[in-house]
Image (tube, coloured by chain):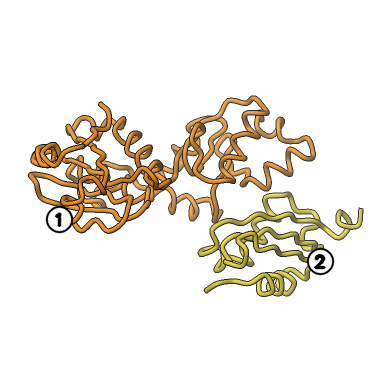
Chain colours: A yellow, B orange
Amino acid sequence: MVYTEEYIKDKLIKELDAVHVEVVDDSDGCGAKFSVVVVSDKFQGKPLLARHKLVNSVLQEELKTIHAFSQKTLTVEQWNK
Amino acid sequence: MSLITIDTVDKFNSLIRSPNLSVIHFSAEWAEQCKQVTEVLQELLKLPEVQSCNSQIGVCDAESLSEVSLKYKVDSVPTVILFKNSQQIDRVDGVDVAQISSKVKAHSTGKAISDVTSKPPLEERLKALINKHNVMIFMKGTRDTPRCGFSKTLISILNGVGVQYETFDILMDEEVRQGLKVYSDWPTYPQVYVKGELIGGLDIIKELQGNGELESTLKA
């Protein structure tokens, strides 16, 4: 399945109660490479690795076929700074 | 040992006649992916298990040796065909580095790919690999020849910090490549481990660099 930015964005908002999500398809619409920014208070109190693992688990199925993925995770507080 | 250049049909025939494994790379000057395959084959030649079995690896120009290409149905480059006693025993069409490595290794040692009983169970092997050095990087390619943008960036960041590290090329080992993802519950490469503990991938390294924690994390 080829994933779109919309699809990934919606999933992240839904599963992580995200206040702000940016998804960019760096593979020019091929659905192969994405970079995301996720702002959610679910990241509060969690170290970097745990935050990234949380995002990874939301996108577990998708990551099996996406070739490259990079992410930035922020809490609402960090985002507002 | 180095890659043999096959420029005549006779040379091709005499090479594949060998009872030992001959690996022939059908290549073309204009194809970028062929350079990649040639480099991979050069690395494979250095492996003890390939050398000890007297395996030979050669490169020929698919277009110049067109009758050979036709005979073995080489429709595209790169194509790697494995021979023993003039018989084609296996092949890889296209630049599938993982398959090329595993097939050359398996046919050299004469072991079936799934039947490697001399290896310890995967988990133990992974644990040993992760702990091989204080800082272990599992990446695509090697530190001198990274084979992916993220791996390349990671290496340059680490070189900048000036910390000692060792790398493992997951393209050379499909078992580790898939097994490690499950073992550490992390779906992508490159992966960085310090003292046997997963730190994360490129994003995390970049973020640590941003908050000035990278050096202390790596030199823990």
Residue type beneath disc 1: Lys
| Left or right of residue B160, residue B106 in this image | left
- Please report, as a chain letter, where disc 1 is located: B
Image-based side of A55 in relation to B88, left or right: right
**Image position, residue B48 (x, y; %):** 27, 30
Residue carrying label 1: B71
The label shown at residue B35 is none
Q: Residue at x 65, y 34 (%)?
A: B157
Chain ID, mark 2: A
Q: Position of residue B206 (x, y in %)?
A: 70, 42
Q: Quadrant of residue A13?
A: bottom right
Identify which residue, B172 or B166, lies in the foreground.
B172
* Depth check, front residue: B62 or B110: B62
What residue is pinned by disc 2?
A20
* B205 to B46, vertically: above or below: below
Residue drawn at (64%, 60%) of the image:
A34
* Residue A17 in the image: above or below residue B18: below
Closer mark to the observer between disc 1 and disc 2: 1
Residue B120 pos. (x, y %): 33, 43
* Residue farthest front in this picture: B64
- Secondary structure under the numbered disc 1 in the rendered image: helix
